Amino acid sequence: MKLTAKMQGVIHRLRTASRKEEQEHTRWQRWKKYWREEWTRVSHPRLYIASAVSAAVLFGISYAAINQIQHTSEWKQVYTDGTYVGMVPNDPKVQESMQQIALGYHVDLRFHNVHTDVPGDYDWQAVASLPTQAVAITSNGSPIVYTEDTLSATKVLAMVRQALAPKGVADLSQVQFVGNVAYHPVVVSASQVMSPDAAVRYILHPAHQPLAGRGTSLAVIAGVKDPVSTSKHQNQPLLQVSAEQTVSKEVTIPYETHYVKDNHLGVGKVSVVTPGKPGKAVEKIHLKYLNGLLVAQSVVQKEVVQEPVAEVVKKGTNAGVADGNWQWPSPYHDITSGFGWRSLGGGEMHPGVDIGCPVGTPIYASNNGVVEDAGWNSGGYGNWVKINNGNGIETVYGHMSRPVVHAGQTVAKGQLIGYSGATGHVTGPHLHYEVRIHGKPVPPTPYM
């Protein structure tokens, strides 16, 4: 039977493997024989020396280990959430305090015993505070509060900005923090990390919301300083929010009052000639707020939609005292009877002058004064007007058809006081004009 090439190759490889196995077995037998002969040649003294040296070395190592244990102390390796953070002394009080913090802030805390030599300046208190990853909200580089993560920090800033924004500002894009307000990743004590609501309350009311753990020494590994402890004694928010707004407002334009001097009115008397009317305008006002309070405003544009109407008022200047030149009391100047004794009719005294004028002729005050009496006089004057012109001077207007002034009224020079007539003891229509000084009639010509 003739073998194929493939079968010949398999047979060749089996023969080669068998020869190698025989060679390896022969080599191992030779090594065993060599070491057996060498061992029999070793003397007993040399074996004792080797054993003694080995025992000495073992004793030295044991002594060094015991000495090392005596000069070191027991510590606890600390693991938070499976991550090694450092060591603390094997003190039950320290461990209990750490466990309380871990429980309150939901931290998985584990301890592992270790015996080691720790340098004296090792800051185990930082480890005891359970350092954890957090996010610090800062103002101009100084930390204000610590939050759990970036999302919490963003939420806190949004809530603070909304709380300090002025009411009625719809566009919050105009509401900004004052200064450089930012947030950065840090490592701080777990007791310093606050919930978003607690962080907002602390920022808005620091005097009433003290931070937990502020009294302990805490490490901030990432290079951001601990918040200033005195800030919690302030009564103002720790952050400031500014806002700007432009509003339109309708305003009233006040009218002016123009005074016109009037001698027909007594001093202190006024009379409105033309009533005033306020105008209207629309103003655009730029408002500035700080923490919701208005701190400044300015008018940036003003449009008048209705002009104001000025008020015109007469202001009395008549003090009720004669001044300057006197004037005729009637438009007529014909004196029909003069001052003095009359030769006819029994020679009676005529205390004034008679001015001839028809009934109904206007009669005017010859100077400033105050009306003492106006109406019927039973002493023969008929309807009369008696005026006190000050400085002891009085003027009398008699036989009038009717007066148009009243007692107590202040009159001005040239003011209408009544109309002529023929009342009283008369023989015809005329005006009786009389001047008295301290009650005694005097020639009236100088007072006309």
Image (cartoon, helix red, strand yellow):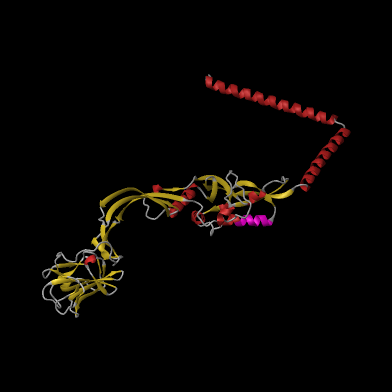
Image quarter (top left, top right, bottom left or bottom right) of the C terminus: bottom left
Nearest the eye: 28 or 81: 81
Question: Which residue is farthest right?
Answer: 45
Please say if 172 is above or below 277. above
Which quarter of the figure has residue 312? bottom left
Examine the rendering and report whether any part of residue 3 can be seen.
no
Nearest the eye: 80 or 280: 280
- Asked if residue 441 is among those painted magenta in the image, a careful observer would answer no
Nearest the eye: 149 or 382: 382
Locate residue 118 relative to residue 12 in the image: left or right.
Answer: right
Please say if 117 is above or below 316. above
Examine the rendering and report whether any part of residue 10 can be seen.
yes
Please say if 139 is above or below 386. above
Which quarter of the figure has residue 54? top right
Name which residue lies at 56% across and 21% down.
9
Expressed as whole percent of the image width and height from the top left, the position of residue 346 reads 16, 80
Name which residue lies at 10% across and 74% down.
428
Please say if 240 is above or below 360. above
Question: Which residue is farthest front?
Answer: 343
Q: Which residues are magenta?
A: 92-100
Nearest the eye: 103 or 412: 412
Expressed as whole percent of the image width and height from the top left, the position of residue 159 reads 45, 53
